[in-house]
Image (cartoon, rainbow, N blue to C red):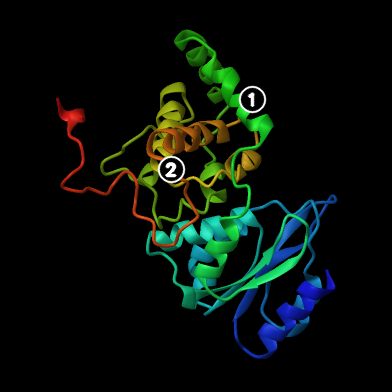
Amino acid sequence: MDELKQKAKELLEKQQVAVIIGYAEGTAGRTRAVFALKPEDSEKLIFDERCKQNLAVYLMKHEVKHLGRRGIVATIPVMRSILQVASEYQLTEADVHVLGITPEGKLIEFDGFKPMEHWLSGQDVGLSAGEKDELAKLDGMSMEEKWAYWKDELSRCIKCYACRAACPMCYCIRCFVESNRPQWIPIAANDLGSFEWHILRAMHLAGRCINCGECGRACPVDIPIHLLTFKGVMDVEADFGVTAGLDAGMESLLSSFKPNDKENFIR
């Protein structure tokens, strides 16, 4: 994509950004993340249908954010992730320069959040028909069937935390699962520990997940763990009318309180 390479080179030459986070050729026909630090590094950049990884996960990394202003090649999920973490005060407009890629493969440059919010408002950011079908099948199960389904799926979990590492919303420097004083959940990959980890992670993502599906793609044992957070996406939209990742000024859904909030939940 020559236009992308040229724009990345220009931004680096003019020192408008310190790094461009993008995609490059990997091994076995796959793509990988690349960090262009010099203008000539922009030649490594590519973009095609294989480029699905949510690169926003790198924006929060200590090694990257301390380089300076970051440019990033951004699909719709990456843009939504940027707006969501910005709403959580983890990112400002001064921190990032977005080289957006439209669903048609066109380059669209955003130097601020408002233009990106406006553009996203006209895009389809919902779950795909296939994803909705998968969730409908789970919703159609009895409580006992759901329990058996997830018990079987999570029995393969090896507690590698690849789902956490791939998620832009899991940006805590130290996750509670790594705490042993007190130890919140079992370290071992057993039934109880796996259930606690995945259910708590899904709860932490309620109202924050932008349905990129990166957690499911990252799982080395192919657990469809993204279905748990996708269920949260659908419930939050149905019950609260809120879609994450569309507004850098959005209030936190599950930790905001207003004096006129209904108090039915405490009765």
Say whether disc 2 or disc 1 marks the residue closer to the N-terminus.
1
- Whether residue 63 appears in this view of the structure is no
Left or right: 238 as drawn, with respect to 69: left
- Going by the numbered disc 1, the residue's amino acid type is Asp
- Would you say 2 lies left or right of 264 here? right
Q: Are marks 2 and 1 in contact (CB under 8 Å)?
A: no
Vertical relation: 35 (above or below) 264: below
Q: Nearer the viewer, residue 146 or 104?
A: 104
Q: In the figure, 203 relative to 72: above or below?
A: above
The quarter of the displayed image where residue 21 is located: bottom right
Q: Of 214 and 141, which appears nearest the observer?
A: 141
Instruction: Tell me if residue 235 comes above or below residue 143 in the rendering.
Output: below
- Can you say which quadrant of the picture contains the N terminus? bottom right
* Secondary structure of the residue carrying numbered label 2: helix
Q: Nearer the viewer, residue 120 or 135?
A: 120
Residue at 54%, 14% in the rendered image: 140
Task: Give the residue at the far bottom of this rendering.
Answer: 14
Q: Which residue is mark 2?
A: 205
In the rendered view, does 157 fall on the left or right side of 2? left
Could you say where residue 222 lies in the image, as x and y percent from the top left? Answer: 65, 32
Note whether 221 is above or below 103 in the view shown: above
Q: Residue at x 78, y 57 (%)?
A: 104
Residue at x-position 44% and y-position 68%: 91
Separation of marks 2 and 1 at Cα, in angstroms = 21 Å
Residue count near mark 2 (Cα–Cα under 10 Å), binned few <14, some 14–19, many ≥20: many
The label on residue 133 is 1
Residue at (55%, 42%) from the top-left corner? 163
User: What's under tag 2, amino acid-wise?
Assistant: Leu
Quarter where residue 5 is shown: bottom right
The foreground one among 147 and 180 is: 147
